[in-house]
Image: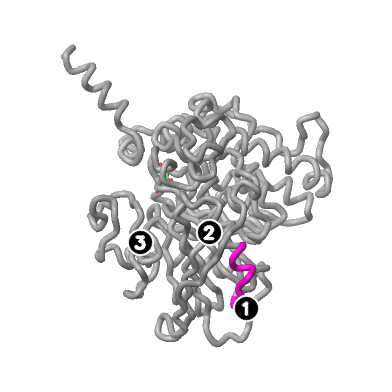
């Protein structure tokens, strides 16, 4: 027995990423009774002790502090525009009769001429045909690339690094013909376009491959002072920050495209990309609706609730997603000066939608709801109603005014039911 012990220890230290997270899912706490009492950090008290009582004081004084806390302790600071310099958008393809004539499809290559080490990202944009006016647009990253989002066979296959998939269509970390349309159930393009909305998406791995060493091939290394940053300091941005940066560059492009109403953009993401959409929305006010689908730990879920995935698990499995400081709160959440109700509050007074799934206990659906609920004091300052209910609603009972929430039947995923709620929510807030 003694001989096996060191071998086992070695295995457990080697196990990181998805495998580690999956192994933890079985042993995590799923018992409400075992959650220790916690106190959330104050939302409406600024660092100098001033109590924040007006929308103006929130916007001028407290909001910048909260944003800076997320930079320092969770996601790291996005470099200033002078760091990346000029951004070039090149339309590389237009198909005016896409999806059987329902839409126009464009591809736009985004590059940074001052940072040629970074290979750039490719936007795929669908705009509805025949409406005669610019379309409001959903903007979100994909896990599998444009060819996986679209059901159309002429979409170029991404040649970038990809995470292995359970159904084996990724071979040697590259997409194959079998990868086509693989993510299309999460992007019901026809349903969205028929409602008069456009969709803009990009493959998150274009900005940085999603593994612990992925930054070496991605934007973060390209923009670092040495062009090959090796030691990440506390407060430096992580991969989530870089993926969120990609979403803001899409917003830059959309502002130049006459087919899109860039005053009405909804940023959306699922799971790790839901964490990304929350952070993109917090930093970029051009996203006037923010949607987090099953974003869980590191996203909408309160970090102080020990339920499902924890800070310790996520920072061990995916250290590259965050700034190094975040790891120091593993098992020590009470010391962290933020919790996720503050991330939701950064959206205010803009509308935000938080979605959970009942079989996604790993993401702590109740903790996701509570963040929305506890953001209410900031929405109050703006005279806005948030989730509008004091308790998490039952299954398939969407609630909320400016802060939408639902707990739907089913597992960790994005399904038509989710989109039906997002379309209604966005249409209501965009006045359509
Ligand atoms: C899991 C991770 C979650 C979530 C998810 C995903 O392994 O623990 O926080 O981000 O991955 O993105 O699919």
Where is mark 1, residue-wise?
134
Q: Magenta stretch: give its range.
A: 252-259
Tell me the mark number nearer the camera, choosing from 2 and 1. 1
Where is mark 3, residue-wise?
158
Q: Residues within 10 Å of mark 3 (few under 14, many from 20)?
A: many
Q: Secondary structure at mark 1?
A: loop
- Of the four image quadrants, the one with ligand 1 is top left
- Give the percent coordinates (x, y) of residue 40: 64, 33
Give me the disc on residue 333: none
Where is mark 2, residue-wise?
268
Q: Is residue 3 left or right of residue 22?
A: left
For residue 297, say whether it is visible.
Answer: no
- Give the percent coordinates (x, y) of residue 46: 77, 34
Tell me the mark number nearer the camera, choosing from 2 and 3. 3
For the residue with label 1, is its CB less than 8 Å from the closest atom of ligand 1? Answer: no
Magenta stretch: helix, strand or loop mostly? loop
Q: Is residue 73 left or right of residue 125?
A: right
In the rendered image, the vertical position of residue 98 relative to residue 165, given as above or below: below
């Amino acid at each position: 027995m003694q001989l096996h012990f060191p071998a086992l220890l070695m295995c457990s230290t080697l196990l990181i990423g998805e495998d580690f997270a999956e192994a933890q899912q079985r042993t995590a706490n799923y018992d409400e009774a075992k959650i220790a009492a916690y106190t959330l950090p104050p939302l409406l008290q600024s660092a100098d002790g001033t109590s924040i009582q007006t929308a103006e004081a929130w916007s001028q004084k407290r909001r910048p502090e909260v944003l800076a806390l997320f930079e320092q302790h969770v996601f790291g600071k996005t470099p200033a525009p002078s760091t990346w310099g000029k951004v070039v958008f090149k339309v590389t393809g237009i198909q005016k009769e896409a999806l059987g004539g329902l839409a126009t499809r464009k591809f736009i290559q985004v590059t940074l001429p001052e940072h040629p080490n970074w290979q750039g990202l490719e936007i795929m944009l669908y705009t509805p045909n025949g409406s005669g006016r610019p379309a409001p647009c959903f903007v979100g990253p994909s896990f599998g690339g444009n060819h996986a989002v679209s059901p159309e066979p002429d979409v170029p296959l991404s040649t970038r690094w990809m995470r292995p998939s359970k159904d084996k269509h990724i071979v040697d970390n590259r997409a194959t013909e079998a990868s086509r349309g693989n993510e299309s159930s999460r992007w019901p393009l026809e349903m969205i376009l028929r409602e008069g909305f456009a969709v803009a998406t990009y493959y998150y791995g274009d900005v940085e491959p999603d593994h612990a060493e992925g930054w070496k091939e991605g934007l973060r290394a390209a923009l670092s002072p040495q062009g090959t940053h090796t030691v990440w300091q506390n407060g430096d941005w992580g991969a989530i920050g870089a993926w969120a940066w990609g979403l803001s560059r899409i917003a830059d492009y959309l502002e130049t495209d006459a087919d899109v109403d860039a005053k009405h953009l909804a940023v959306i993401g699922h799971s790790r990309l839901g964490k990304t959409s929350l952070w993109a929305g917090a930093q970029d006010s051009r996203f006037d609706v923010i949607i987090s689908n099953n974003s869980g730990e590191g996203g909408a879920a309160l970090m102080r609730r020990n339920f499902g995935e924890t800070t310790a698990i996520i920072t061990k499995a995916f250290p590259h997603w965050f700034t190094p400081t975040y790891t120091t709160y593993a098992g020590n959440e009470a010391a962290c000066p933020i919790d996720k109700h503050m991330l939701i509050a950064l959206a205010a007074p803009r509308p935000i939608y938080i979605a959970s799934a009942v079989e996604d206990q790993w993401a702590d659906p109740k903790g996701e709801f509570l963040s929305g609920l506890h953001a209410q004091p900031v929405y109050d300052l703006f005279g806005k109603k948030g989730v509008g209910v004091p308790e998490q609603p039952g299954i398939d009972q969407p609630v909320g005014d400016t802060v939408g929430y639902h707990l739907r039947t089913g597992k960790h995923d994005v399904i038509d039911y989710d989109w039906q709620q997002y379309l209604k929510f966005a249409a209501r807030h965009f006045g359509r």
